[in-house]
Structure formats: structure tokens, C-alpha cells
Image (tube, rainbow, N blue to C red):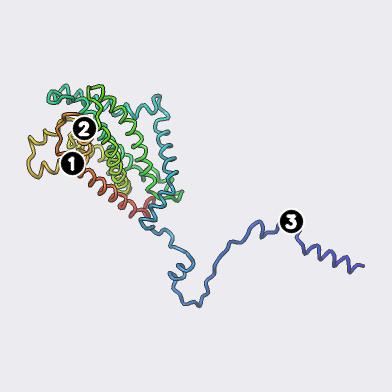
Amino acid sequence: MLHSVTAHQASDSAVPSGPTRSEHDPMPETAVAPADTGLSLKEMARQNGLSASGRLPSLPEYTRQLVAYRHFIQAHASAKMTSALGNTKLGAVWQVLTPVINAAVYFVIFGLVLNTHRSMENFIAYLCIGVFVFQFTQSVVQTGTNAITGNLGMIRALHFPRASLPLSAAVVEIRNFLVAMVVLMAIVLATGEPITLQWLLLVPLVLLQSFFNVGLGMFMARYGSKVRDVKQLIPFIMRFWLYGSAVLYPVTMFENVLKGWQLQIVEANPLLIFIELARHALLENVVLANPPAVLWIQATVWSLVVGIGGYVYFWRGEKGYGRG
């Protein structure tokens, strides 16, 4: 009898009454390579689907990663807009007020004090177009330069394609520019310009300049992470670029002081080209630096070269961001 009870208890103890350790903490599946295979470490890693830690992904693979993180880019851009304007009383109104105030200041100095407006039919619209288009690129350059250095904590804590940061900064400025364009068109109408079919040219123009700005922002993001002092030079560089882009005065003034190859270099300035195309779309009887067909070809070339080149340049430095 004692023997039967003992056997029964032994059989009960063999059956677990609750979850076992293996159910709570399952052992991860692993693959152990035999030591006598004669394969190199690289070949063994390839057979088991392993890759080197910190490996630079190929450009197509990197692009697919960015597409997969598109929701993160949008959310990060929205968060930046909220944090930048959330503590101000006017909030998003500053997206419009900033270029309007800049245009007003330039109009007082160049239009009234220097009498530049007398040589043009609609100087107010001419000036506002230049200021709004130039500030679009200027804002992307400024925010792009700080895209890496201003987010080192996030970069060191999380794993994501680093191009998401300058991309989200560019998305913020693209949104701001679209709002500013509505105000710009209202200013153009208020100064007596009619609505024409040429206004539709603004759509491809905004796309080209946005692609140009994204590449330029990525270039500045990587360069700014390597050369921290460039951030201090950006205001002076952009001011020099402003005066060389015919923002504040007629583009024909360059012809009075420059000839030959010097004039060709100035007229090949990408921002001058984008501004000229915007004026061609919104204004009637405006004198351009080159025929519209030439300007469109130049704008397309600049957008492709800077857009793709800036993206590749940033991708090449992906492994080094946040280190050192």
C-alpha cells in the first residue's frame, strides 16, 4: 500500500502543476556553426543571414528605410512646428509675418530711401516674390545645418536613418512656404497683377525648389556636423547670396557692372533662377535674366544635381553621425 502511494505521488510530481521556467523564459533560437566547417567568418555570416554591426546600407536600401520611416518624419516635423510656435501668442501666424516684415523693411530701404521702385512698374510685388522665395531656401539651410548637432541625444539613443532629421526640417519649411505662397499671391493681386494661366507654373517651380532645398539641407546637415563653426558663418553667407540673387533690385542692374563670363556666373545662380521663374509666373511685363526656357532648364539641372548630390553626400556619412 505504501509502495502504491509513493508511486502515485511520484507520478503526480512528474507532471508540472503550473507554467514551467521554459514557458516563462523561452530560450532564443540560436544557430551554432560547427568548428570544423573550414568556412571563413564572412562565409559563415552570409550563410546564417548575419551582417556586420554598423554596416553602411546600400543607397537603395537606405531609401527604402526612409520610406518606411515616413510617418516618423511627418510626426517629427509636426512636433518641431508645435514646439517652435507653441509658446508664442500668434503661433502659426509668424509663418506669414516673418517674410512680410522682411519685405516691408527692404521696401523702405531699397524702395523708398534708394528710389529703386521708380525704375519698375510693380516694385512691391517684385520685391515680395524675391524675399519669399529666397527665405524658403534660407530657412532650409539654417535648420539643416543644425539637424544633426541639435539632435545628438536622439541620434545616440535611437536607431533610425539619420536622413530623417534634415528631411523633417525641410518638411517644416515646405509647409511654411506653401502658407506663405497664399499670402504672396494675395499681395500680387492687391498690387494690380491679374490671375493668368502662368500662375500654374508655380506648381513645378515649388517642386523643383523643394527638391533643391532638401539636397542642400542634407549637404549642410553633414557638413555642419563635421565643421561646427560653419553655423556662425551661415548668416554672412546667406546675406551675400541675397545680394547676388537680385532679390532687392532689378536683375538688369547686373548688366551695368558685369560682362561676359562674370555675368554668366551671376545669372547661373540657382536662387536667382528660382526667383526669376516665380516672377515670370506671377508678374506681367517683367524683364528676365534669360528666356524662360533657359531658366527652366537651369532650374531642373540645379535641382537634380543638388538634390541627388546632397542626398548621396549625407548617406555616405551615415555611420559617423553622433560619434566623437
Q: Quadrant of residue 77?
A: top left
Q: Earlier in the sequence, mark 3 or mark 1?
A: 3
- Mark 2 residue crowding within 10 angstroms, few (<14) / some (14–19) / many (20+): many
- Which residue in the protein does label 2 denote? 279
Query: Whole-percent x and y of residue 192?
Result: 22, 22
Q: Is residue 113 visible?
A: yes
Q: Are marks 2 and 1 in contact (CB under 8 Å)?
A: no
Q: Is residue 227 visible?
A: no
Residue type, mark 1 in image: Ala
Q: Residue at x 91, y 67 (%)?
A: 2
Q: Residue at x 42, y 41 (%)?
A: 74
141 lies left or right of 89: left
- Which residue in the protein does label 1 denote? 293
- Which residue in the protein does label 3 denote? 18
Query: Whole-percent x and y of residue 29?
Result: 57, 63
What is the C-alpha distance between the residues marked 3 and 1? 79 Å
Describe the element under mark 3 as helix, strand or loop.
loop
Q: Are marks 3 and 1 in contact (CB under 8 Å)?
A: no
Residue type, mark 3 in image: Gly
Q: In this orientation, which residue lies closer to the viewer: 31 or 205?
A: 205
Q: Earlier in the sequence, mark 2 or mark 1?
A: 2
Describe the element under mark 1 as helix, strand or loop.
helix
From what the image shows, is residue 65 above or below residue 52? above
Which residue, as the protein is rendered here, is positioned at the far right? 1
Q: Earlier in the sequence, mark 3 or mark 2?
A: 3
Residue type, mark 2 in image: Arg
Q: In this orientation, which residue lies closer to the viewer: 117 or 150?
A: 117
From what the image shows, is residue 299 above or below residue 59? above
- Mark 1 residue crowding within 10 angstroms, few (<14) / some (14–19) / many (20+): few
Q: Nearer the viewer, mark 2 or mark 1?
A: 1
Query: Whole-percent x and y of residue 26?
Result: 63, 59
What is the C-alpha distance between the residues marked 3 and 2? 78 Å
